[in-house]
Amino acid sequence: MTIRLGTHKTIVIIFFVLFLGLGLHLVKDYGICFDEKDQRDFGLTTINYVTQADQRLLQEHDRQRGPLFEVVLIALEKGFHLTNNVRSIFVMRHLTTFLLFYLGVIFFYKLGKENFQSWQAGLLGCLFLILSPRIFADAFYNPKDIPCLSLFIICTYTLIKYLKNKTFFNTFIHAFACAVLIDIRIVGIIFPFLTLVFTFADIYILPLKNEDSKRVFLNLFSYFLFLILFTFLFWPFLWASPLHNLIWCLLEVTRISIGGCSNLYLGQKIQITNIPWHYIPVWMAITTPLVYVIAFCVGYVRTILLAGSDFIRFYRLNKSGLIFLVLFSLFMLQVILFKPNNYDGWRHYFFIYPAFLIFSVAGLRTLFDFARGLKGGVFIQIIFILLILLNLGSVVSFMIRNHPYQNVYFNNLAGRNMKEIKCRFDLDYWGLSYTKALKYIAANDPDHFIPYYLDNYYIIQPKETEMLNPQDRERLVLVDDIKKAKYFLSDYREHPQDYNYKNIFYSVKVDGAAIAVVYRL
């Protein structure tokens, strides 16, 4: 069928073409986060283990992390001969991270369309995902949590397709996707359990013929066979002792710990080993656009009520909704009941955000359906639309106005303004604003040798200059003694208050609040 202008396919294609163009245009604007160089080193260590039998991987501090995405990035780096061009390496990494997120958004459209049986709802979910400022910014430079989020979306989609039609092809694709996710973040091991539980639920709840049951069991066996094969194949650390090392990784990942690291939360410094039960829910609530939060509450509660009123019927009619409910609720209960170590906001749980947005879209549909049944329902729906557009307009305005620092977005629940919020929560905890501050120093200081000191030197290696041109990178030298420095820089991590130095040389601001400062000593 020929696609004519105005059809839904044309609208969807235009949407994704514009989004791709936007990402390609912005990819060079973002700085380097603290973790990026360490992640790259981890990828190099893994590659060297495979190609040179370098045993350092077996003593690597973070060897419990899945290496697959980093291995892909190193392969691209070597394939494009970027080894000697530091800035190009990190631009390539940002581009690849964004493209994986872009793929995740495409699958999120498919998920929404499948779940709601509506292409408009699918596209609205994608718009919400893109217009989530923190997710949008991280989609360029976060090599840990964004790949995990993207693969969570893809695995959820392949799970639903597998449950809908348990063919060998769907089984193979689902197993491959799950293995890739596990080899990026071991939290993906939840999907084999969901696959097993929902397969047996299908057998119990849905009528199957004898031959269908045999085919289902055969494909389930094939799923676990391929899953195990691909998981071990893509994770070199497991090769030496597959079962022992996998169990060790599962246990070790629950003991995340960075010595001395703390969070600024509700105006108090708290150690990552002593976070309160409400840490993740509060961070999600204050850093997500308000319209999504309100709609989520409606959609989530309604889904629970529907599932509880007639579970068997709900399962048969809305199995995908039940999957989203399990995914979100399971991990939210985990953080509330067990209070695992967490730091840097809620980025470690970005992977539950797609389920959150599905409930947001469901909540909006519920509100509009409810308004339709009221007297003057059309007028109420128009008010809803205006309020949604007003909130989304403020989000877009923030993203444009403060580009490329969408990562410090907060809604009105966090405080009256950014200056107040700065005293209550961490802002640029990953030091992305250092790139702009250092560019300013290089452009305004003619010296050939410019020593600078960072307030949080203890967690930083000389990597924040690597998005600068080679000449400026040579001139700017990070020193470990403030007495040797010409400039003092801070991103206010673990130090939200102002400093006692007098000569402010430059500051990076978001809505009037400094997220990075440069003092000339």
Image: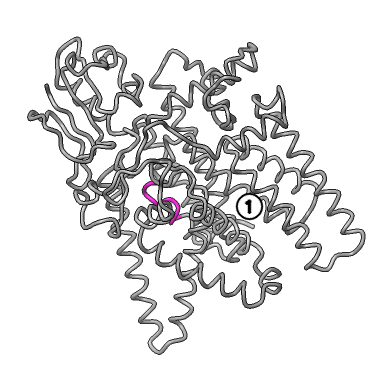
Residue 245, percent from left and from top = 67, 29
Which residue is drawn at the image coordinates 53% and 57% (left, top)?
333
Q: Which residues are magenta?
A: 127-134
Q: Which residue is mark 1?
A: 157
Residue 253 in picture, x, y percent from top left? 56, 37
Numbered disc 1: secondary structure:
helix
Classify residue 178 by image quadrant: top right
Vertical comparison of 39 with 341: above or below:
above
* Quadrant hosting residue 247: top right
With 179 as the anchor, is 75 left or right in this view?
left
Q: Is residue 201 visible?
A: yes
Which of the two residues, 370 or 515, is positioned nearer the viewer here?
Answer: 515
Q: Nearer the viewer, residue 246 or 73?
A: 246
**Which quadrant of the figure has residue 127?**
bottom left
Residue lying at 44% horizontally and 44% vertically, measured from the top left? 347
- Amino acid, disc 1: Tyr
475 magenta-colored: no
Instruction: Name the side, left or right, on which 184 lies relative to 245.
Output: left
